[in-house]
Image: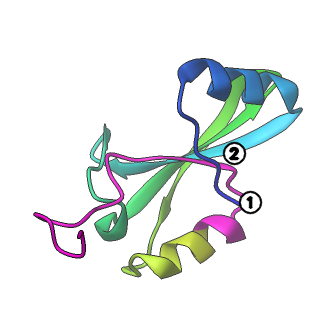
Amino acid sequence: MVLCYYSKTDFFNSVTERDMMKIAVTYDNGNVFQHFGRTESFKVYEIEDGKVVSSEVIGSDGIGHGALAGLLAGHDIQVLICGGLGGRRGSRGVS
């Protein structure tokens, strides 16, 4: 399950309420990559007692969009941080 938080307070309260949490960040050359569905790698942080205890970079193996959710679930990721999840251009599909 990937959780979304609408405020920093909600996020940090959630981190401190759990013993251990894994956070994935879309990653490119030391920066947050701006397009979730096209990311080639994630930086995964393991948090214990509100502190980062380890990190690693995992590859996406070129899979996109829907399959990335399965990749993250397979690594027991609870939180995703990314530049964006996409969206519709203009007003397509909006009435």
Q: Amino acid at mark 1?
A: Asp
Residue at left 89%, top 32%? Answer: 19
Q: How many marks?
A: 2
Magenta span: 72-95
Q: In front here: 38 or 44? A: 38
Q: Is residue 67 above or below residue 53?
A: below
Residue with the mark numbered 2: 22
Residue 39 falls in image quadrant: bottom left
**Dot 2 lies on which element?**
strand
Q: What is the CA distance from the residue labelled 1 to the residue labelled 2?
A: 7 Å
Q: Label 1 neighbourhood size at 10 Å, few (<14), some (14-19), many (20+)?
A: some
Determine the main secondary structure of the stretch shown in magenta. loop
Q: In front here: 18 or 29? A: 18
Q: Amino acid at mark 2?
A: Lys
> Quick check: 2 left or right of 61?
right
Q: Where residue 20 is drawn, which disc sits there?
A: none
Q: In front here: 12 or 61? A: 12
Residue at left 74%, top 28%? Answer: 15
Q: In front here: 34 or 49? A: 34
Residue furthest out toward the front: 95
Residue with the mark numbered 1: 76
> Quick check: 9 left or right of 30?
right
Q: Label 2 neighbourhood size at 10 Å, few (<14), some (14-19), many (20+)?
A: many
90 inside magenta stretch: yes
